Amino acid sequence: MSTFISASNLADLMGTSLATAQRWGESGVYPYHRSDAGKGGFFMEELTDVEPVKMMLHTKWDDESNVVPLRDFTSVELFAGAGGLALGMHLAGFRHVLLNELDTIACRTLRRNHPEWNVLEGDIHRVDFTPLKGKIDFLSGGFPCQAFSYAGKKGGLNDTRGTLFFELARAVKEIQPKVFMGENVKGLLSHDNGRTLQVIRNAIIELGYTLVEPRVLKAIMYKVPQKRERLILIAIRNDIYERGIRFSWPEPYHRIMTIRDAFCKGELFDTDVPDSEGQSYPAKKARIMAMVPEGGDWRDLPIEEQKDYMGGSFYLGGGKTGMARRLSMDEPSLTLTCAPAQKQTERCHPTETRPLTIREYARIQTFPDSWVFEGNMANQYKQIGNAVPVNLAFAIGRSLIRMFNEIERAMPEQSQLESALKSVQRMVPPSLF
């Protein structure tokens, strides 16, 4: 049976425009087809020279799903947020010893869902990580993208002072984990003309680690119904790297998940999406959004309505395709933001004229329905929108566990889980300083 992929999804996999992907079909570069819903696209089996599609067709996803840790591998997570990355790593097999997060409501969410996790609430600048030295296998954190001073000619760790990357690096220096991971926005690659990433590279060398060549992972390749991209940085301690231990990036899922997969019973979830609270449109906006077809945006409105809704933006260049945007059931969602009804990044339900609900938001980020978000509705949207998709984290986590199993075979040692947990119990919450 052939697997259909829309022109839009192929464009996202290839990092090109929809117009280019459509041109491939129209010009006969690849055989062009129509889905049952009339959408233009391709059969994946006829795209064997397209590298991302080739990877999906020959994936070892199922084999990786069976990877289990040889022992309890201990983990610390910084900037933990509402737990998307933490949950994915937990499902992969890591045992979280400590999670640090500044936001009080996000900490409540973490404790609500995993009371056994040690959540250290407060400012990371005030956390002393030295009690955990030599007891932690893996450290991770999604640090914000910030410009560095770049004072020195080579730009190393000292040039990152005052940034949250420096705090992650300080934690690495004090703990000395075997491996650490940073995740960030794709824009970090080009931030400050590439100088930001170069300083990070230099800092990692100073710390005594070898950086795996960074990679931008597309969430749609890892069983996530969302066009979200994250830059992943993984560094291996030099004494381990010198033994020939290497990291292999996760295998992709065999097809792209859509909003239909997120909202309806099937491969992703055992039930249809449950009812939950959500924002609503004011009457004027509801009238406008009702005119937008599934998968459409402001350009599908009558011309006078376009001018009225867009205001001065109507006369500016650029597609502005996030405005008055209605999602499509048979496509992945656009990247979720911290609110579902912002004018510049509209995320209207595919078939109903309303913003996505809390549980719909959570499903697109592949949180289980059992994961409860604390705080008011705006807090909940923000926590979900800022999270790493759980299934993306799970895929990365399995690949990391596979590498840790290799490390364990080469350098066997007993788990430091109990000792690490005792050390954490003695650490003073930074909010009490």
Image (spheres, rainbow, N blue to C red):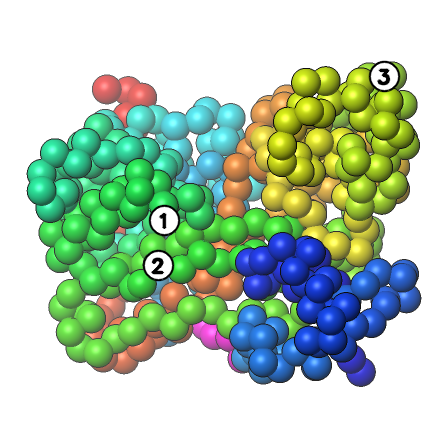
Count of residue discs: 3
Quadrant assignment for the N terminus:
bottom right
Q: CA distance from mark 3 to mark 2?
A: 45 Å
* Numbered label attached to residue 1: none
Q: Earlier in the sequence, mark 1 or mark 3?
A: 1
Q: Alpha-carbon neighbours of circle 3 within 10 Å: few (<14), some, or many (≥20)?
A: few
Q: Amino acid at mark 2?
A: Pro
Which x, y percent locates residue 57? 62, 79
Residue drawn where x is 36% and y is 45% of the image:
190
Discs 3, 2 touching: Cβ within 8 Å: no
Comparing 242 with 151, the one in front is 151
Residue bearing mark 2: 214
Side of 261 where 425 appears, left or right: left
Residue bearing mark 1: 189
Residue bearing mark 3: 284
User: Looking at the image, can residue 8 be seen?
Assistant: yes
Boundaries of the magenta span: 63-68
Q: Compared to 326, does 310 lie above or below? A: above
Q: CA distance from mark 1 to mark 2?
A: 9 Å
User: Looking at the image, can residue 419 be seen?
Assistant: no
Q: Amino acid at mark 1?
A: Leu
Badge 1 marks a residue whose secondary structure is: helix
Q: Compared to 108, does 404 lie above or below? A: below
Picture quarter containing residue 238?
bottom left
Discs 1, 2 touching: Cβ within 8 Å: yes
Q: Compared to 78, does 324 lie above or below? A: above
Residue 202 colored in magenta in the image: no
Q: Amino acid at mark 3?
A: Lys
Q: Alpha-carbon neighbours of circle 2 within 10 Å: few (<14), some, or many (≥20)?
A: some
